Image (cartoon, grey):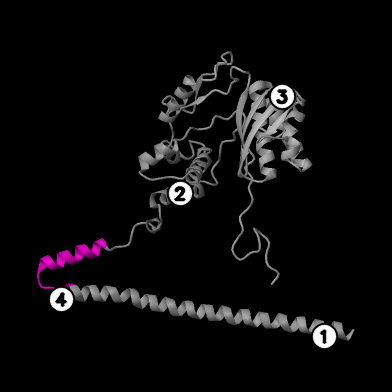
Amino acid sequence: MAFELLNFSLRRLIKTSLIYSRRYNAQRFLNTVSVKSTNTQNATSQPAILVESKISSLTSDADKEALIKNIALLQKPRTISYFTGSPFYNDLIIQLDELMEKYKDHPKITRDKKDAKTTLWKLKHTLEIELDITLKSSEYRKITDRLNALDLLIPQTAPKVRQFLKLFQRDPNAPSAIHDVIKEQKDKTIDNDDNTDQNENITVNGTKKNKLTLDQYGRSFATGKRKNASAQVSLIKGDGKVLINGKTLANYFLALKDREAVLYPFEVTSCIGDYNVWVIVKGGGPTGQADAIAHGIAKCLMIHNPELKSILRRANLVARDPRRVERKKPGRAKARKRYTW
């Protein structure tokens, strides 16, 4: 009982001390603010007195006019965005925010997300040319989000906003140059599945690449990667032999999990024993090399049978695994582990 009373009294004492300390700090803060405000008022009146005395000391009218012009050039900028890195962008955001705040209580149009026809705004590169600024993707997204919010206003209630939004609207009948380039690239793309010539070229995003096909001996070639390991894989119909850097699978990978990782694409597609594999692998450790070989085998299987792509994609074997070991940080034992003391 005595211990509980002592504990209660200590907590009460600490609480009262905190209250008095907060009141003292608040009063001290108000005193410093009042002193600074009086100092700034005196400081602002001093430059005007100095300028007037400087002008009165000059004798010729030409010197007085030159001094007045120099003082006019040193006036404060019109907006606070002048001191930011991108003043035109910040001014536009401030203007859009002021419009949203002004018309926040006005009636708005309710649109169904499925059937709604969204307004097409000018693209990022078009705004950059018209406003003579450089926009990031995030900045362009902020602008369009505010424009979409203002576009929900009923035109009869906010005609000035509607006229302002027309400055940012894009003409749907006049596509941009980027759309024209994308359309040309799609038209030039060649996708002839009947041709099996290895030297056949296709156009992908404007660059020519060799179409992945079987050679004259029925072999497929692909490169698999994982971490720092890179594997050049060759696949052909056979009886299930696997040679890695001139060694068999059991002699090259001693761990069972690594051997299972290499054969995992065949297990998923039910093709164990149907193909022979030759691999040249470099870099990385056993785990990285095993995953790189599996990635290359999956790409070779898709060349032999494109219908296996969906199965291999569900098994996460089509795309390269981008994960890497996280780097050690300074002041820590490892990437995230901290020292005890």
Q: CA distance from mark 1 to mark 2?
A: 59 Å
Residue 299, image x, y percentages: 64, 29
- Callout 3 touching callout 4 (CB < 8 Å): no
Q: Quadrant of the C terminus?
A: bottom right
Mark nearer the N terminus (3 vs 1):
1
Mark nearer the N terminus (2 vs 3):
2
Figure check: 13 above or below 95: below
Task: Check disc 3 and report the residue beneath it.
Answer: 275
Mark nearer the N terminus (4 vs 2):
4
**Can residue 287 be seen by looking at this rendering?**
yes
Task: Check disc 2 and report the residue beneath it.
Answer: 93
> Which residue is depicted at the point 41% across and 78% down?
38
Q: CA distance from mark 2 to mark 3?
A: 61 Å
Residue 174, image x, y percentages: 41, 26
Q: CA distance from mark 3 to mark 4?
A: 99 Å
**Residue type beneath disc 4:** Ser
Q: Nearer the viewer, residue 296 or 215?
A: 215
Task: Check disc 4 and report the residue beneath it.
Answer: 57
Residues in magenta?
55-73
Residue furthest out toward the left: 60
Q: Quadrant of residue 329?
A: bottom right
